[in-house]
Image (cartoon, rainbow, N blue to C red):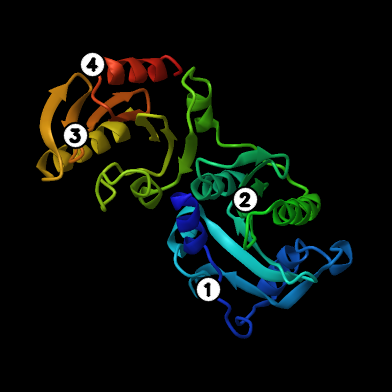
Amino acid sequence: MKIQKLLVLMFSVAIIPGWMHCTQETINNKKDILALLPDQNQLKGWKPFGEPQYAKGEDLFLLINGGAEIYYEYGFKQAVIHSYSHEDESSVNVEIYEMEDAESAYGIYSFKIGEEGKDISVGTQGRLEDYYLNFWKGPYVVTLIGFDNDSTTQQSLKKIAGLIDDTIAEKGTPPALINYISELSYPYSKITYIEGNLGLYNQYEFDTKNIFGVSKGVVARYERYQLFLLHYADSSEREQWLQTAEDHLKENNKFSDYTKIDKGFTIKDSQDQLVRVTSCDNFILIYVGEDEPGKAEEVLKDVEEEF
């Protein structure tokens, strides 16, 4: 619940007056994304409240309270946000973000959802969590936020989400990197696709700097540990960033007990968690969690067998 409330605050709307300066291309793009909003005639008992708020490029900083940076890291293009009110005085905020491509849309979706809630059949993937609903489809990520978690509100969220889903033609597929995790026998509670250091930092605080040079990767959360797969163009690039990360972490006073191992190193964090970093193929593999004898080696070996 704590994570859910934090995310809702992070991505909440800041109503701003007026419209941004528009080029003809912007006007055409705006029309495309505005067309995804539900038509009032489709919404029994609901009606739009105020004007839709639109942003493209860096204007996103003006549209949402915090969290814009992560959208840019995933390849933000444009967004529209609109509020709807019901005759029973309840309300719903609808946020539609167009990202660079389907992989980027999946990435921001995986970043926004929590570990609770339930998967629902909307978009390519969707999840209903308490009083908000997220789904992604094609290059779009859609968030609907209600203001309570009763069954009536949840049904309204699903109905409005379904109407938006119907207007998006392209489906899209998750990034192929996800398969390295999803095909393992270990059941994860959450999987996140990252496209930069900000996404990585929000999963685990290795360093504020991009010491791993990460541009694409997967983070899976399990009951007692996290698993990181960071992808590189080739083994030479991988080795360069493995050495950079090793040099930084062994000098970072938040870590201790540095030990050199075959193809990598281990270290302990301030919570006495084991951090085991190894390399395989074009990947840096990282285990962060309980220091159970042989556990990290077993997990990382199973991942290597997927390559």
Whole-percent x, y for residue 244 in the image = 20, 40
Residue at image point 31% right, 35% down = 237
Does the residue at mark 2 contact the one at mark 1 (Cβ under 8 Å)? no
Q: Nearer the viewer, residue 23 or 60?
A: 60
Question: Hey, what amino acid is under mark 2?
Answer: Asn
Residue at image point 61% right, 82% down = 21
Does the residue at mark 3 contact the one at mark 2 (Cβ under 8 Å)? no
Which residue has dot 4 on it? 293
Q: Secondary structure at mark 3?
A: loop
Measure the C-alpha gap from mark 2 to mark 4: 39 Å
Q: Which mark is residue 134?
A: 2
Residue at image point 10% right, 31% down = 257
Whole-percent x, y for residue 298 in the image = 33, 15
Q: Earlier in the sequence, mark 4 or mark 3?
A: 3
Q: Secondary structure at mark 4?
A: loop
Q: Earlier in the sequence, mark 2 or mark 1?
A: 1
Which residue has dot 3 on it? 272
Q: Secondary structure at mark 1?
A: helix
Question: Hey, what amino acid is under mark 3?
Answer: Asp
Question: Hey, what amino acid is under mark 1?
Answer: Asp
Q: Is residue 284 left or right of residue 26?
A: left
Q: Earlier in the sequence, mark 2 or mark 4?
A: 2
- The answer to whether residue 234 is visible is no
Q: Pick the quarter of the image with the C terminus.
A: top left
Residue at image point 68% right, 46% down = 137
